[in-house]
Image: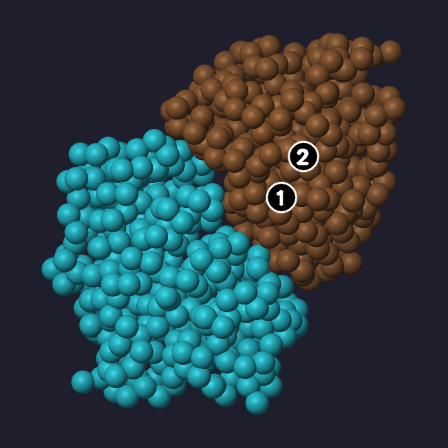
Chain colours: A brown, B cyan
Amino acid sequence: MNAPLKNDRYLRALAKQPVDRTPIWMMRQAGRYLPEYRELRKQAGDFMSLCKNAELACEVTLQPLRRFPLDAAILFSDILTIPDAMGLGLYFETGEGPRFERPVRDFQDVVALGIPDPEDDLGYVMNAVRTIRRELNGEVPLIGFSGSPWTLATYMVEGGSTKNFAEVKKMAFEAPEIMHLLLDKLAKSVTSYLNAQIANGAQSVMIFDTWGGVLSPRDYREFSLHYMKQIVDGLTREADERKVPVTLFTKNGGQWLEAMAATGCDALGVDWTTDLGDARKRVGEQVALQGNMDPSMLYASPERIRQEVQLILDSYGSGTGHVFNLGHGIHPTVKPEHAEAFIHAVQEFSPAYHR
Amino acid sequence: MNAPLKNDRYLRALAKQPVDRTPIWMMRQAGRYLPEYRELRKQAGDFMSLCKNAELACEVTLQPLRRFPLDAAILFSDILTIPDAMGLGLYFETGEGPRFERPVRDFQDVVALGIPDPEDDLGYVMNAVRTIRRELNGEVPLIGFSGSPWTLATYMVEGGSTKNFAEVKKMAFEAPEIMHLLLDKLAKSVTSYLNAQIANGAQSVMIFDTWGGVLSPRDYREFSLHYMKQIVDGLTREADERKVPVTLFTKNGGQWLEAMAATGCDALGVDWTTDLGDARKRVGEQVALQGNMDPSMLYASPERIRQEVQLILDSYGSGTGHVFNLGHGIHPTVKPEHAEAFIHAVQEFSPAYHR
């Protein structure tokens, strides 16, 4: 039995219920910009060892919460755990980002993929979720997450990071039936993976569609959004007698917010290339919004950061339905003091928008 | 005295005059995907030697026109010629892209920058423009170009390519007065540079704003669009008793087409993340549109490429005002036969939209 939730601002804002101030968390809030993270990472060795050890993953998840008054914790994990569990052999090359030993290139490769069982094949993630939820002790809600099917497919087909998306787009354009088979398997895998995270204690989930924005509008609907909707439709939407809100975030997806909101999700992540007030006018009746300060703003002075927070609060305007965040993950070279100034500014200025 | 223009489809479409078929050219049509380019490049040594030799630059410009029935030629040059002429020391590191020996980091650096005289400091470009125009012999119009002030500033402040735009954004956010001084100098430099290209024979010009799309809407207007408008206002708009159309292209700028069209330019480049039919509805009364096939579509089969061309022609619909292009530069690893299939498909299918 987990402790009752003390700070539910994040869940209330996503449900568009009144809050005393705008809740805030940061994408990649547990990460390399924190010296205590770098220290632990050095001890653990590589990145995946950190993810696969429940105690260490829990410790890393909690680090930013000890420093800053954040309104949510997010599971420390990688977006590529599912393809790793499918047997593709995830590894990290220094300075190169994630790589797969066995990329997926043809029909046979896709047919051979199984749908991972979250408890058996991704037990280390579930273990981390349970540990974090217990250690959070009801302070703030825990966000679970996964990469979107399209985003996972880009890494699986390319075998790693890519600039032109040559291989994955070639498959999508040239052999859409193979791509759809892959995406369908991924959507099923993500659904059961997120449902297992919820069953183990995640109080909200987020789908990161990092690479949906490299597609044309038509291709986005066909290869990315369709499968995110399939996941939304299959998710457990209530746990502990509370709604489990689901947030979709397509980086560079500002042109498609209406279509994303129509999936039936609870909230959209918005990056900084869209004005938050415009986004609210377009979809704010249907969904809550998370965002959207440019993460590079954290390179500016605390005074300038405070000014930007006010502009974004003004842009969204009064009332609930806004979770403050960066428009993308915090950069590893940002000073923690600047993140602190950001978080404090949201706390200081946002109550005026909730009277 | 240059030869009269034989194929003016490109200029007519940009002026929204009737055409028999949709004109086509490709961004980076003179480049690495062509074996004859790679051969010449090997002989010339480095990239800038190719740009600085008028005969070689002319030869490279004409190479794609000998292979394909394109409706425009584009000056072979680099977007970073202006900062190079300002004395920043442009060089290319293998696999690293462009670099500057002396990046611009503070007020003194910006104050020290002079505005290059196009004939004296960039005479090699003007020489190339004259040579190409003469050798084109009126076959198709010649497009001149420059990088946008913001895009030039990103390379000048970062000292090369960048992922997070940390330095240039820090300057913009933290010391906007220094950034504006830099951008104003760049806008003046680009204006006189493009006017000199026009005086020397360019029949149309294009401003490439490769990095405007990494800004928030507010920052885009302040740091990128404002200076593109300043350039549009200062350009020679007629030569040889013909209009010299100016095209603005902000990569990932699909959300801001209305604001771009309001600058008074003649056309907008549109990348593939925006539906061309939607773009036409939004701004097609004011400006012509260039675009917008995903360059990665050229990795697919000729049959699939032909299908995509039809979808894009359908999306734009009947009538003039469309110049077919890719949504970004052609990738170096594309097969020339696929580019050919693309160009032929536009020629074959587009007349039906101009009856």
Q: Which residue is mark 1?
A: A280
The structure residue drawn at horizontal position 52% and vertical position 56%, both measured from the top left corner, is: B254
- Check disc 1: other Cα within 10 Å, few if <14, some if 14-19, many if 20+: many
**In the image: residue A32, left or right of residue B11:** right
| Image disc number at residue A321 | 2
**Spatial separation of the CA atoms under disc 2 and disc 1:** 9 Å
Dot placed on the residue nearer the N-terminal end, 2 or 1: 1
Q: Say if residue A328 shows up in the picture.
A: no
What chain does badge 2 belong to? A
Residue B242: x and y in percent read 29, 82
Q: Quadrant of the N terminus of chain A?
A: top right
Q: Are marks 2 and 1 in contact (CB under 8 Å)?
A: yes
Q: Quadrant of the C terminus of chain A?
A: top right
Q: Residue furthest front?
A: A355
In the structure shown, which secondary structural element does the residue marked by tag 2 occupy?
Answer: loop
The structure residue drawn at horizontal position 26% and vertical position 54%, both measured from the top left corner, is: B187
**In the image: residue A199, left or right of residue B230:** right
**In the image: residue B56, left or right of residue B224:** left
Residue B305: x and y in percent read 62, 69
Quadrant in the rendering for residue B25:
bottom left
- Check disc 2: other Cα within 10 Å, few if <14, some if 14-19, many if 20+: many
- What amino acid does circle 2 point to? Gly
- What amino acid does circle 1 point to? Arg
The structure residue drawn at horizontal position 43% and vertical position 29%, both measured from the top left corner, is: A307
The number of numbered discs placed on residues in the rendered structure image is 2
What chain does badge 1 belong to? A
